Image (cartoon, grey):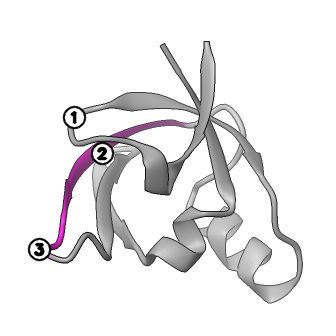
Amino acid sequence: MTRLTIREMQKDQSGVVSAVRVGGELGRRIRDMGLVPGTTIKIQGRAPLYDPVALRVKGFTLTLRDNEADHIEVEVE
């Protein structure tokens, strides 16, 4: 398996969150959104200028700015 950040993933690619590499308020906010290790995600698409990224998490759609997506590592096949 390969580890990528959410920002590096392509449309329709899916994987499992392996780590959130940021602490403080931003780290807490990311975890509160459901992006914790072991969570399966799928990239739904990107805005025309590639920021933000839309992903599917636990049955809902979530959008993240690239500066947030850079801190989340995902294992993909």
Whether residue 41 is in magenta: the answer is: yes
Give the amino acid type for the residue marked by disc 1 in the picture.
Asp
Give the amino acid type for the residue marked by disc 3 in the picture.
Pro
* Disc 1, SS: loop
Which segment did they paint magenta? 40-48
Residue extending farthest right: 23
Whether residue 33 is in magenta: the answer is: no
Nearest to N terminus: mark 3 or mark 1:
1
Nearest to N terminus: mark 3 or mark 2:
2
Nearest to N terminus: mark 2 or mark 1:
1
Residue extending farthest left: 48
Magenta stretch, main secondary structure class: strand
Neighbour class for label 1 at 10 Å: few (<14), some, many (≥20)? few
Q: Position of residue 60 (x, y in %)?
A: 29, 55
Disc 2 to disc 1: CB gap under 8 Å: yes
Q: Foreground mark, 3 or 1?
A: 3
In this picture, residue 44 sits left or right of residue 18? left
Q: Foreground mark, 3 or 2?
A: 3
Label 1, on which residue? 12
Q: Position of residue 51 (x, y in %)?
A: 31, 76
Quadrant location of residue 70?
Answer: bottom right
Instruction: Identify the mark at residue 48; answer none if there is no mark.
Output: 3
In this picture, residue 72 sits left or right of residue 28? left
Q: On screen, 7 above or below 74?
A: below
Neighbour class for label 2 at 10 Å: few (<14), some, many (≥20)? many
Label 2, on which residue? 43
In this picture, residue 5 sits left or right of residue 53? right
* Disc 2, SS: strand
Q: Position of residue 39 (x, y in %)?
A: 58, 37
